[in-house]
Image (cartoon, helix red, strand yellow):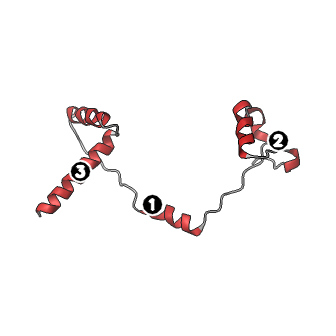
Amino acid sequence: MKKRLSPAKSPLPKFKSDAAAAEYFDNHSVAGVWDQLPEASKAKLSPALAKKIHDRHARAKSPISIRLDPEQIAAAKQIAAAKSVGYQTQLRMWIAEGLRRETKRA
């Protein structure tokens, strides 16, 4: 556990603004004083934000395994690159499109 320092003994200067802090860190490294820096307090989330994060995790994508021919993967990568999207995203879009089309037929 890091030793806590009082703000008066902090190895970093006090900053009057975010811009001043940004300028300082653009020109200085904290590597030499990293172990002397006080630990940050744990962030407290608002109930609304905590619920939003929980809901997002609840509907997260589930990983699956699917075997594809190397030529199919290469073709998907080439098409996805031309559209500036990842090939897995492109594959998910095609699956969603096929599901919508088949749902309409049923």
Classify 10 Å Cα crowding around label 2: few (below 14), some (14-19), many (20 and above): few
Find residue 69 and report its horizontal and vertical position in percent. Answer: 20, 35
| Between discs 3 and 2, the one toward the N terminus | 2
Q: Nearer the viewer, residue 35 or 78?
A: 78
101 above or below 51?
Answer: above
Q: Classify mark 3: helix, strand or loop.
A: helix
Residue hosting label 3: 95
Q: Label 2 to label 1, Cα distance in Å?
A: 39 Å
Q: Nearer the viewer, mark 3 or mark 2?
A: 2
Residue type, numbered disc 1: Arg
Q: SS class of the residue under badge 1?
A: helix
Label 2: state its secondary structure: loop
Tell me the crowding category of disc 3: few under 14, some 14 to 19, or many 20 or more residues within 10 angstroms, Cα based. Answer: few
As shown in the figure, which amino acid type bears the numbered disc 2? Answer: Pro
User: Which residue is more in the foreground, 40 or 82?
Assistant: 82
Write the residue at 76% across / 40% down. Answer: 35
Q: Is residue 61 above or below residue 70?
A: below
* Disc 3 and disc 2 in contact, CB within 8 angstroms: no
Q: Which residue is mark 2?
A: 13
Q: Residues within 10 Å of mark 1 (few under 14, many from 20)?
A: few
Q: Who's the residue at 23% across and 42% down the image?
A: 67
Where residue 56 is drawn, which disc sits there? 1
Rendered image: mark on residue 46: none
